[in-house]
Amino acid sequence: MIGSTRQVRVYAYREPVDMRKSFDTLTALVAQGLRRDVMSGEIFLFVSRSRQRSKVLFWDGTGLCLFSKRLAKGRFAAPWARPGDGPLVLTTSELALLLEGSELIGRMPLSPPPYTPANRVLRWG
């Protein structure tokens, strides 16, 4: 399991990516395309044009980790087909669903909004 906290953000690159790319080239896509720091602890998702392969890149504190998955059946959701500008931001739970081949990712919110202390209402009595 990569992470289980809502504090970790997942950024999906919104264009198809050549899966021959490795650490350095994917790091450049994070820096130039997503305008993020690869060593931030955030997770970065890349999906191939055929949507049968994906890669996940993240910094674990000691080095870059690169995970790759090829679906035997079905296709990954296409981040580039979802409305909006900039990267598609997911939760780690939504990333897990996407990596299992779920097509619901990005179509509708699958997770509740993150809790913030400002939203807290105390009811006494």
Image (spheres, rainbow, N blue to C red):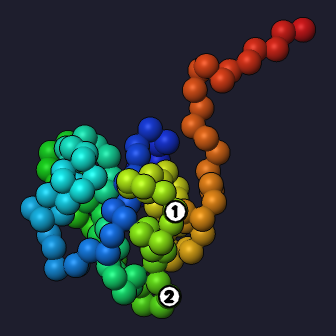
Marks 1, 2: nearer the viewer: 1
C-alpha separation, residue under disc 1 versus residue under disc 2: 22 Å
What residue does disc 1 label?
A: 83
To which quarter of the image does residue 52 belong?
A: bottom left
The label number, if any, that marks residue 113 in the structure image: none
Furthest residue to the left?
Answer: 24
Side (left or right) of 8 relative to 68: right
- In this view, the residue in front, 70 or 16, is 16
Q: Name the residue located 50 percent from the left edge and 66 percent from the top edge.
A: 82
- In this view, the residue in front, 122 or 89, is 89
Side (left or right) of 125 relative to 89: right
Image coords of residue 33 (percent x, y): 24, 56
Q: Name the residue located 33 percent from the left edge and 62 percent from the top edge.
A: 13
Side (left or right) of 69 relative to 89: left
The label number, if any, that marks residue 74 in the structure image: 2
Image coords of residue 37 (percent x, y): 21, 44
Q: Quadrant of the C terminus?
A: top right
Residue 56 in view, yes or no: yes
Q: Is residue 88 above or below residue 79?
A: above
To which quarter of the image does residue 14 belong?
A: bottom left
Residue 60 in view, yes or no: no
Image coords of residue 41 (percent x, y): 28, 43
Residue type at tag 1:
Pro
Image coords of residue 73 (percent x, y): 48, 91
To which quarter of the image does residue 107 belong?
A: bottom right
Q: Quadrant of the N terminus?
A: bottom left
